[in-house]
Amino acid sequence: MTGKTAGGLNPAKRRIKKMVSYNKVILIGNLTKDPEIRYTPSGTPVANFRLAVNHKYKQGEGLKEEVCYIDVVVFGKQAENCGQYLNKGQSVIVDGRLQERRWETEDGQKRSKHEVVAQAVRFMPKRGDSATPTGKAESVPEDVEPALGGAENDVPF
């Protein structure tokens, strides 16, 4: 037998044809500035922010650190919550997908950029106490669940 099945294809080749793609991004980082909120023409809230994600590694006898800056876009009620409760320097967990946007500038140059479209943004506990810069503790609504609140919120890595 030559490795063919009743369908006529080698099982390995059949698996390749059924291969699916998977686009999932999980990031933990700090906001580089306060989120910007805007609204689509239909009224959907959109929040944009940039996340700084650090990577430390050993090189020779020293410890090196690289920072990767990643643009994140959030839609809907979650976007409003990000705009209301997140500030520069705050840590978040972003769960989403990678997207490439392409456009052409007014002078005809083609541009593109990759960004993460967040499906979930989890707020990490603030450093120090829970007071805002004004000194008042701000309550977070029940539908905005801070990260690391219990075993069900553990990050799987």
Image: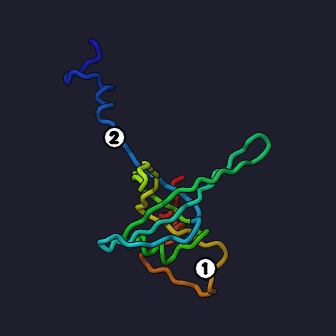
Outermost residue to the left: 6
How many residues crowd around disc 2 within 10 Å: few (fewer than 14), some, or many (20 or more)? few
Answer above or below: position of 105 versus 87.
above
Answer above or below: position of 83 versus 14.
below
Look at the numbered disc 2 and give the secondary structure of its residue. loop
> Which residue is at a point 54% across and 65% down the rendered structure image?
92
Residue 20 circle label: 2
Location of residue 124 in the rendering, given as x and y in whole percent from the top left corner: 56, 68
Residue 42 versus residue 21: which sits nearer the camera? 42
> Which residue is at a point 54% across and 52% down the rendered structure image?
157
Look at the numbered disc 1 and give the secondary structure of its residue. loop
Q: 155 left or right of 133?
A: left
Looking at the image, can residue 99 be seen?
A: no
Which corner quadrant of the image does residue 33 belong to? bottom right
Answer above or below: position of 124 versus 68.
below
Location of residue 146 in the rendering, given as x and y in whole percent from the top left corner: 51, 71
How many residues crowd around disc 1 within 10 Å: few (fewer than 14), some, or many (20 or more)? few
Answer above or below: position of 60 versus 147.
above
Location of residue 74 in the rendering, given as x and y in whole percent from the top left corner: 42, 65
Looking at the image, can residue 141 be seen?
A: yes
By what rule are the colours in the image chosen?
A: rainbow
Residue wearing tag 1: 130
